[in-house]
Amino acid sequence: MKRIKVKYKKLGKFKAWGMANYDDNTIEVDSNLKAKKKMEIIIHECLHCLFKDMEEEDVIKNSVILTNTLWHEHFRSIEPEQKIPLQDGTK
């Protein structure tokens, strides 16, 4: 798996901020989310795809830790992407 595909849609009728589809490694994120909460939910749903057996309590705890760490380091979606390869050599 190279990445988890993120789709944005209104999820209010599901009473959810995000949902993970394990079969095709895609996540759906509520299109109304912004900033830090959006980051948290993307991380949360990605953890579900990566660690299918992880308990919900642990997914929540780890997604909050990762979100707070990245936010503290000023990661935001408004910065232009640098073309530096990831640790596995992919861009």
Image (tube, rainbow, N blue to C red):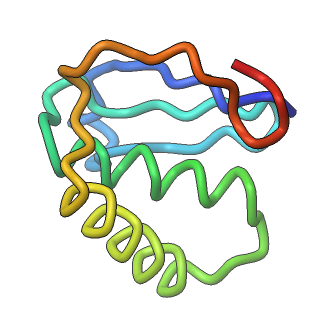
Q: Is residue 76 above or below residue 65?
A: above
Residue depicted at x 14% and y 28% = 32
Query: In terms of image quadrants, where is residue 42?
Result: top left
Q: Is residue 76 left or right of residue 8?
A: left
Residue depicted at x 13% and y 39% = 35
The quarter of the image holding the N terminus is: top right
Q: Is residue 74 left or right of residue 8?
A: left
Q: Is residue 74 above or below residue 76?
A: below
In this rendered view, identify the residue nearer to me: 45 or 82.
Answer: 82
**Where residue 44 sits in the image (x, y, percent)?**
46, 58
**Where residue 69 sits in the image (x, y, percent)?**
31, 68
Residue depicted at x 33% and y 72% = 64
Q: Is residue 12 left or right of residue 59?
A: left
Q: Is residue 69 above or below residue 27?
A: below
Q: Is residue 24 above or below residue 59?
A: above
The quarter of the image holding the C terminus is: top right
Counting the numbered discs, the total is 0
**Where residue 86 sits in the image (x, y, percent)?**
69, 34
